[in-house]
Amino acid sequence: MTPPPSRSADGLRGLPDTQRSMRRRNLARVMHAVSAEGPLSRAAVAASTGLTRAAVSTLVDDLVRWDLLEEYGPGRPPAAGRGRPGSALAVSDRGPVGIGAEIGVDHLAVCAVDLRGTVRARAELRGANRGRPPETVLADLALRVRRVVEECGGRGLWPAGLAVAVPGLVARDSRILDRAPNLGWPRTDLGALLPGAPPLSVDNEANYGGLAELWLDPGAPRDFLHVSAEIGIGAALVVDGRLLRGTHGFAGELGHVPVHPDGPACRCGGSGCLERYAGEDAVLRAAGLDPGEGRSSLLAERAARGDRTALRALRGAGTALGIALAGAVNLLDPRAVVVGGELAALAPWVLPPLEEELSRRTGGRDCPVSASRLGKEGPLLGAAHSVVRAVLDDPACVTERS
Amino acid sequence: MTPPPSRSADGLRGLPDTQRSMRRRNLARVMHAVSAEGPLSRAAVAASTGLTRAAVSTLVDDLVRWDLLEEYGPGRPPAAGRGRPGSALAVSDRGPVGIGAEIGVDHLAVCAVDLRGTVRARAELRGANRGRPPETVLADLALRVRRVVEECGGRGLWPAGLAVAVPGLVARDSRILDRAPNLGWPRTDLGALLPGAPPLSVDNEANYGGLAELWLDPGAPRDFLHVSAEIGIGAALVVDGRLLRGTHGFAGELGHVPVHPDGPACRCGGSGCLERYAGEDAVLRAAGLDPGEGRSSLLAERAARGDRTALRALRGAGTALGIALAGAVNLLDPRAVVVGGELAALAPWVLPPLEEELSRRTGGRDCPVSASRLGKEGPLLGAAHSVVRAVLDDPACVTERS
C-alpha cells in the first residue's frame, strides 16, 4: 500500500486545547462552505462562514497544503466549470479519497470516491463468499483495495480511510463482524484480517445504504426507513437526519421481524422471519429458480415476460415486506420508506403488493414507498462517502493519519 | 378555576433577547441544582452551578418570589430533613403543581404533583368511556380537574399546567386526539372541550408512561422500550433519554404490529394485530370472562388459583407480546423492555412466555424484560411530571402563564 504523502499540522501545533478544537471546527466550516457552494473566492468563504478574511486565509493555506482545497488563479477556471472572476477555491479532486468496500454474500466490491463525490476507481469480484473462510475472502478484498489505492495513487490521490460494508451485525464503533448468518462466518475481526489497510471502519451494509440515501439523494427526507434487501434483509432507521444504531449497534434487523411466526425455521434461531419470504434466496426458490445460479435479473426478465410463477413469487415477497414494514411503520412513524438492494430492481412487481399491505395495516397513514435510485450501489457508495464526510467534518484528521 | 397569583417577571423585563435567554438558562440551572441536590445554601448552589454568588443571589430572589424555591433560616431545617447549618434553599412544596390527567377506556383520573414530585391531590372516576360522547367525558374530566385544582388551592398550590394522557394518536405539539379506535371517538380537539383549564398539553398515554419510567425510576436505562398494555397496547421508544415521536407524532403503535397477519380483523383496518391477542379485552375473552365486567384483577386471582383457562389465556398474551416485541427489538435494539399498564399486574404469568419467545427470535440478544414498578399509574404520573419538568427546565415560564 502506498503511504500517503506526509502532511504537517503546523497550523495546529502548539495551540492550547480549546484553541485547537476551535481551529478544527473552523477548518470544517471552510471545507463545508466550499464543498456546498464552491468554487468560491476567499472573500466569499469569509462571507459564507462569518469568519474574518484573515482567519479564512490561514485556514485555507492549511487546507490547500493538505490537498483538501485547490486554488485557481484568475483566468484559469476550475475544472467544475462554474468559475468566477478572480482566484477561486474548490474542493480538491487530487487529494484524499474515501475507499468503500462491500462484502456481499456473492460478491466483493471496492471503490474510491474523491472529496467532490466522484467515483475515481473501482474493482469487483463476483462469486459466492458464503461458507468460504473469512481469511480467504478478506485476502481477496485486500487485493482489490490495494489495486484501487494504486490506481488512485497514479492520479495523485491517497486513501483517507477504508469503510467496509458487511451483511451482518457489527457492534458500535467496532471492527468485528459479530454475526453474519448469511455468510456462515464465525465472529470475525476485520481489523486483524486487513493489516496495512487505510484507517478502517466497519458497519452493516444497510446502515451504509441508508446513509448513502441521506447524503446522495437531494430529495431524501430527514426521517425515513431504508430497506436493504439482498439475500439478507436489513434496514437503516434514519431519525432526524441521524442513524438510529441501537444500544449495541444492532438496530435495523428487519429481516428477522416475524411475518408468519409459525412459518419455516430461520438461520437466526427464530421462525417465519421476513427473510424466509422476501430474501433473495427465498424469492428465487419460490419462482422455481436455483438460488445457486439464478439471479434477480433473471427473475425480472421472467416477470416482465408475464411468467406466472415469477409474478406470484414477487407478489409474495411484496406482501411479506408489507407485513414486516407495517410493524416498523406503526412503531417508528417514518416520513417514507425507501427500498434498496437487489429488490430495488424488482420494484415494479414488489412495490404494489407491499404498498397495499402497508396501507391497510397502518390506518392509511401517509408513508410513501419508493425504490432507491442507488439500487445495489447504496452500501458501497455510503461506505466510501462516510470516509469523505469524516474528512469534511474534521479536515485536520488527515494530518493525524499521515 | 382559581387563577394563580400574579407573578411579575421583573428580573427579565427590559433585558435584550440574548441576555434574557441566558438568564432563563441560569434560572433553570439553579432550579435543577436545588431539585437534584437540595437543600443547598446559596454558596453551595454557586459551587454546583459554577455561577457567581452574586448571580445566584439575584436568580434565587426571583425563584423565591415566584414560589419555586423556599429559603429556610438558620436553625430551621427544611421539611426534607437533610438540613445544613445556615440558611438553605429547597424546592417549594407550596408553589406550582403539575396537573396530570388520564382518559382511559374505562376510567378517568386526575392528580396534582408538586415540584418535589409528591402527589398532593387526586380524583378518579371509574366507568366505561367507550362510545360516550367526548363532550360528556371531557365535562366529567374538567369537573375532576377543577376539584383537584381547588383542593390544591386550599394548600397554597396553583396549577402550572395540565397534561392529558389519551389512549390514541396525537399529532406532534397538538391538542387533538387524532384517532382513538378503543374509545370509538371521532377526531377530538381537547383544547376546545377543556376551556378555562390550565395551559394544556395532550399526548398518548404510552408516551407519558415511558417518560414516567425514565424520570421516576432511578435505575431506568437511557434506551428502552416501554409497553403500555391496557385494552389498547402502545409503546414508548426512549432513545438516548429522549422519546422517539416519529414524523407525525404517531410512533409507538405496538398494538397494531401484525402478529398473525391472517388473524381476526382489527378496529384499525388491519388483521391479526397484537391487540387482538394481548389487549385486555382479548385476554379476558380468551379466559372466558366478559370484558364488560371482568377485570384484570379477577384474571390474576384465577391465575393464582391455577385456573387452566386463565393460565392459557395469559400464556397466549405473553407469546403474542413476545412475537411483536421480537420485531421491535430486532428493529430498535433497546437496552431493555419495561411492561406497564394492566398487564404489569399479570407479569408473573405473562413475562415468562414473553421472554422465551423474545429470546428465541432475537438470537439470544441481551434485552431484559421487567414489569414497571409504576404499573397502571405510569401515564398519569408521567403527565403530571411533564408539567413539573417544564417548570424546572424553564422556571420563568410561570411568569408568562400567570
Image (cartoon, coloured by chain):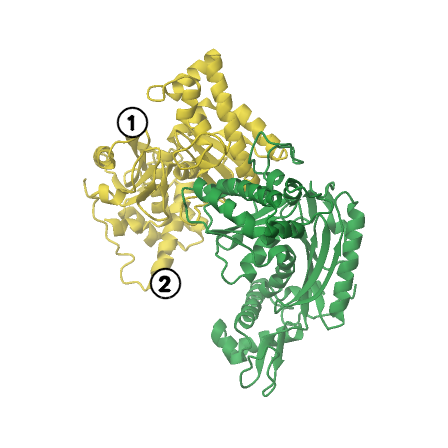
Chain colours: A green, B yellow
Q: Which residue is mark 1?
A: B128
Q: In the image, residue B358 lies at what x, y percent?
A: 57, 31
Question: Dot 1 falls on which chain?
Answer: B
Q: In the image, residue A138 lies at what x, y percent?
A: 77, 51
Which quadrant, please, contains the C terminus of chain A?
bottom right
Seen in the picture, residue B244 relative to B219 is either above or below; the reply is below
The answer for how far apart the CA atoms under marks 1 and 2 are is: 51 Å
Q: In the image, residue A150 lies at what x, y percent?
A: 77, 66
Q: Which numbered disc, 1 or 2, marks the residue closer to the eye?
A: 1
Q: Is residue A400 visible?
A: yes
Seen in the picture, residue B278 relative to B270 is either above or below; the reply is above
Q: Which residue is mark 2?
A: B18
Q: Amino acid at mark 1?
A: Ala
Which quadrant, please, contains the N terminus of chain A?
bottom right
CB within 8 Å, label 1 to label 2: no
Out of B52 and B165, give the one closest to the viewer: B165
At x 54%, y 86%, the residue is A85
